[in-house]
Amino acid sequence: KIFLGFGLDGDGSPATEVMTLTQGGSVGIGTNAPAALLHVDGIAIIDDLRFDSLSSHFIKNDSNLLRIAGDNGIKLQSYDGGWQDRLTIIDNGNVGIGTVSPSEKLHVAGDIKISGSTAVINLENTSGGTQVGRITFDQTGNNKLVISPHYNNAANKIQLAPQNNIAATFLGSGNVGI
């Protein structure tokens, strides 16, 4: 082993080891028994971490933001008796939770919980101006689930269309067509 240290003790050997290089080529910083090619025992500050010779696989501090890049997307996994995929971002920007092949901008395989004093889902169509539909669960007073166009207008309507066949229409005026 080769040790790099500062200061000398009484017999001329380094008093404080700060880095170790083993015969096998492993480097230890803060440890004299490295368990991998590079073993750092302590806090390490790394500005740009590359995972192979490709410049497209890295973790980087980018203007105080953590930037994670992968050539074919990014996976976050956790270990629960085996590695489990938890979050996947593929090249086209689609995000999957519980799936490794998201087919939409957000694809969730499993249950979703939205909570708050008034839980709201806004559905926005920006193709012809900003049009918003809203699904709200409100527990103030009586519990109620409200499905509505966001803007109050008698021309607004909500339609129930199983298998794309309109079965009922609720008009903003209060009239119902079945």
Image (spheres, rainbow, N blue to C red):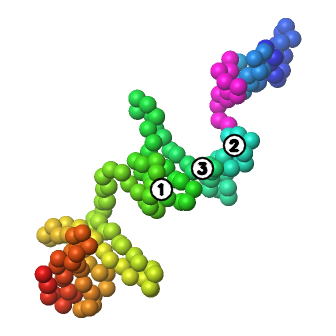
Q: Position of residue 21 (x, y in %)?
A: 78, 20
Q: CA distance from mark 1 to mark 2?
A: 24 Å
Mark 2 packing: few (<14 Cα in 10 Å), some, or many (20+)? few
- Foreground disc of the pair 1, 3: 3
Outermost residue toward the right in this view? 12
Mark 1 packing: few (<14 Cα in 10 Å), some, or many (20+)? many
- Foreground disc of the pair 1, 2: 1
Q: Main secondary structure of the magenta part?
A: loop
Residue in the image at 70% along x and 43% along y? 50
Quick one: label 2 or label 3, which is nearer the N terminus? 2
Residue in the image at 31% along x and 68% along y? 120
Let me know if residue 46 is in the magenta part. Answer: yes
Q: Mark 3 = which residue?
A: 72
Residue in the image at 44% along x and 45% along y? 86
Q: Nearer the viewer, residue 109 or 150?
A: 109
Q: Position of residue 47 (x, y in %)?
A: 71, 46
Using the image, tell me which numbered label, if any, was put on residue 49. 2
Q: CA distance from mark 2 to mark 3?
A: 17 Å
Using the image, tell me which numbered label, if any, was put on residue 95. 1
Q: Is residue 66 left or right of residue 153?
A: right
